[in-house]
Image: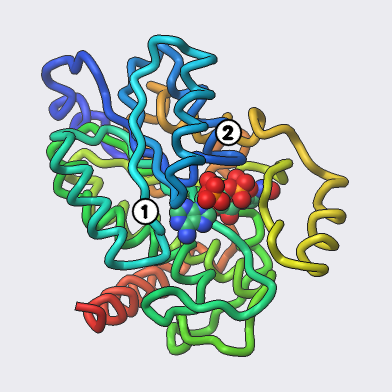
Amino acid sequence: MAGSDETFEELSGAEKVSKVCLITGATAGIGQAAAIELAAPKYDFKLVIVARNKERCENTVALIKQKHKDAKVDYLVADLSSYKQVRQLASEFKSKYDQLDVLVNNAGAIFFSHRESADGLEMTWALNHFGYFWLSLALSDLLKKSAPSRVINVSSAAHRRAFLPSMDNIGKEKNQTGYPTYGNTKLANIWFTRELHKRMFANGVTVNSMHPGIVATNFASDNGLFGNLFRAAASLFWVPVEKGATTIVYLATSPLVVAVSGEYFENEKISKPSKLALDDAMAEALWRKSEEITASFK
Ligand SMILES: NC(=O)c1ccc[n+]([C@@H]2O[C@H](COP(=O)([O-])OP(=O)(O)OC[C@H]3O[C@@H](n4cnc5c(N)ncnc54)[C@H](OP(=O)(O)O)[C@@H]3O)[C@@H](O)[C@H]2O)c1
């Protein structure tokens, strides 16, 4: 779904001196490794990291400054599974910054027992899908104003085993957790990417999703025995966090993807997602359902 270069050249206009990048889930794992790399002076980003714990945010800022002493980095604290907190985060961000060049929706998790968000949504859906949906929409005006700008949604190859026949039970499942629900939310990341691409590309905003690989992070910890078994199996394939972060950094910075949008990436290359992920009627249905659920919180 690469788009016309013309649109982007027109929108590029005046050269920007400095760019702003907001990255979620940057206190650990893939997000932290990506944040450390994106803070390198060569990219000229003002980096805003987001996570739910102030101390861990401060530790990450310190870590980034250890690596790049002149790094421009700020943090904002929010629980991204909560609609209210995501709205607050977006308005705080807008009160401090009047541009957003790159948004990386990365914070995500798997839950092996049923948990509910502050809004009563099943937690995997709340964090992995609604967190991305709410934040991207709340910042969409700024992304358009900052065009050419980029949205990167961290998905997973786990979407390939997902099977979500309808939107009826999104966020309401009581009996389903673990890998099936996780896979469904990662499929949702690709549907969301494709639908957001349709709505934003004409405004100069590219939207892509990606799989980081199977990466040695805290992922699935804090999940008891099932979490430990899952991690033991995954550890056979683990790659280091720096490797997991490379496709995020590529999508955030490479001139080669300035006008590429609506795609799914693995290892810095466009990859074909599952057949179901390419079903744009489902992508549109997910969008409508997400709007409907969100409207019930207002
Ligand atoms: N690891 C893999 O093999 C793998 C494979 C495919 C895809 N992914 C995807 O990669 C992304 C990052 O995963 P990771 O492996 O780096 O996991 P991780 O090490 O567990 O890091 C997750 C990050 O998200 C933050 N976070 C979690 N819940 C949050 C919430 N409610 N509100 C705000 N921030 C929250 C965490 O903050 P705290 O410091 O507060 O915990 C942490 O910074 C996820 O979307 C995951 O689905 C991972």
- At 53% from the left and 14% from the top, the residue drawn is 67
Of the 4 image quadrants, the one containing the C terminus is bottom left
- Crowd class of label 1 (few under 14; some 14 to 19; many from 20; radius 10 Å): many
Q: With 10 as the anchor, is 120 left or right in this view?
A: right
Instruction: Name above or below for residue 165 compared with residue 104.
Output: below
Residue 30, located in which quarter of the rendered image?
top right
Give the residue at x 64% y 78%: 177
Res. 72 visible in picture: yes
The label on residue 245 is 2
> Is residue 272 in view from this perspective?
no
Residue type of the residue flagged with mark 1: Ala
> Marks 2 and 1: CB-CB under 8 Å?
no
**Label 1 beta carbon less than 8 Å to ligand 1:** yes
20 sits to left or right of 179: left
Amino acid type at image mark 2: Ala
Q: Nearer the viewer, residue 123 or 205?
A: 123
Q: Quadrant of residue 82?
A: bottom left
Residue 78 is tagged as 1
- Mark 2–mark 1 Cα distance, whole angstroms, equals 22 Å
What color scheme is it?
Answer: rainbow
Quick one: SS at disc 1? loop
Q: Residue 3 location in percent, x, y?
A: 30, 40
User: Quick one: label 2, few (<14), some, or many (20+) residues within 10 Å?
Assistant: many
Q: Earlier in the sequence, mark 2 or mark 1?
A: 1
Percent x, y of residue 169: 47, 87
Give x and y (percent) for residue 238: 78, 41
94 sits left or right of 276 in the view:
left
